[in-house]
Amino acid sequence: MNSNQIACFLEIAKVHSFSRAAEHLHLSQPGVSRLIASLEQEVGQSLLSRIPHQPVELTPAGQLYYDFFTKTESEFRLLQKKAQAIASQISGKIRLGFLSGWNALSILQPYLNRFQTQYPQTDICLSFYDPSPLREELLHGSLDAIITLEDSLQNCHNLKKIVFGKVRRMLFISRDYPGLSEDRAPTVQDLKNTTFFIVADNSFDSRAFVRNHLASSGINPDIRIVPNVESAISCVHNHLGTAVIDEWSREMGQSSLWHIPLKSYNHAVLAWNPERISPGLQVFTKEFALLPSAKET
């Protein structure tokens, strides 16, 4: 049962004619007849009488459905008015921070566009930071919410989070790194004697994770810490070693690099401080939680 079927049924009941209903709804008469036939088939009842040269009338079953659909349509219009009133009251600015160098913005852009269309009085201001300053801006109240990796928030227990994506960790190595074949992508074993560059800060240090993960492949890695993704990729381009970065990084588009997937994942999250939540941000997070892959933690 769909809205087109119901609209046709209500219009026919109102004007007592298939042809006039089709004209009012800007549909063909055969199209209207098919919609009513499919509706009657779904409900298992004849809803409209069809006597040649006489006005179309409701059957007893049709009267029941007419009363129900009329009430439902009225309630739906009232609901729309209430929703519009709420939308008009939600105003102000949402300061949203993104992890720099991450392509999550392109993935979430349809949602952001839809939210601003639905709540036109709310302005979403975007900023981009590395993991540590992104987290600090949120904790200090300079940002209302952030899009980041869950690992970077391990010690921030007062934040609310919505997980909305799984992110595979990758190894990046220059295609012309000495000793590698140009014909095939290297394996983790091919890189066991290289230096592994990882991005870390005071809140989250992934050295233990990388070391434990590579130990399963019999590798005792030489690990070096760098402050951001740009530094890690610069080391890779200069043949200093390989970098451990997530697959949503913009570096995935660089044809000069090999991208070797690891059997390990991080999670993409929206995070905010529940003690500093405005009406606009409250609506934003509730709408965000409705994304198909979203899960609040």
Image: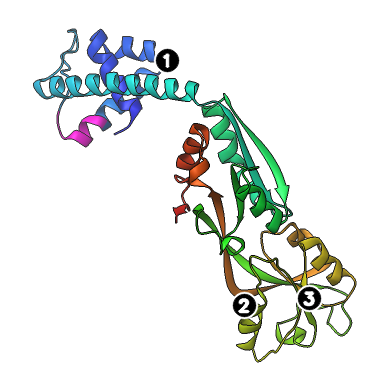
With 261 as the anchor, is 284 left or right in this view?
A: left
Name the spot of residue 93 as percent of width and height, x first.
61, 31
Hey, which quadrant is residue 9 in on the image? top left
Question: Whole-Å distance between the Cαs marked 2 and 1?
Answer: 63 Å
Residue holding disc 1: 26
Query: Is residue 42 within the magenta segment?
Result: yes
What residue do we see at 32% from left, 13% from top?
A: 21
Name the spot of residue 25 as percent of width and height, x first.
38, 15
Label 2 secondary element: helix
Residue bounds of the magenta highlight: 39-45
Residue holding disc 3: 242
Quarter of the rendering occupied by the N terminus:
top left
Q: Badge 2: how crowded within 10 Å, few (<14), some, or many (20+)?
A: few
Mark 2 or mark 1: which comes first in sequence?
A: 1
Residue 209 tag number: 2
Residue closest to the far bottom: 218
Q: Badge 3: how crowded within 10 Å, few (<14), some, or many (20+)?
A: many
Label 1 secondary element: loop
Callout 1, which amino acid?
Answer: His
Mark 1 or mark 3: which comes first in sequence?
A: 1
Mark 3 or mark 2: which comes first in sequence?
A: 2
Question: Whole-Å distance between the Cαs marked 1 and 3?
Answer: 63 Å
Quarter of the rendering occupied by the C terminus:
bottom left
Of badges 2 and 1, nearer the viewer stands: 2
Question: Whole-Å distance between the Cαs marked 3 and 2?
Answer: 16 Å
Q: Is residue 39 above or below residue 240?
A: above
Name the spot of residue 124 as percent of width and height, x first.
62, 34
Q: Is residue 14 visible?
A: yes
Decide which of 242, 161 is in the foreground and name it. Answer: 161
Hey, which quadrant is residue 156 in on the image? bottom right
- Are the two marked residues, 1 and 3, in contact with CB atoms closer than 8 angstroms? no
Query: Is residue 291 within the magenta segment?
Result: no
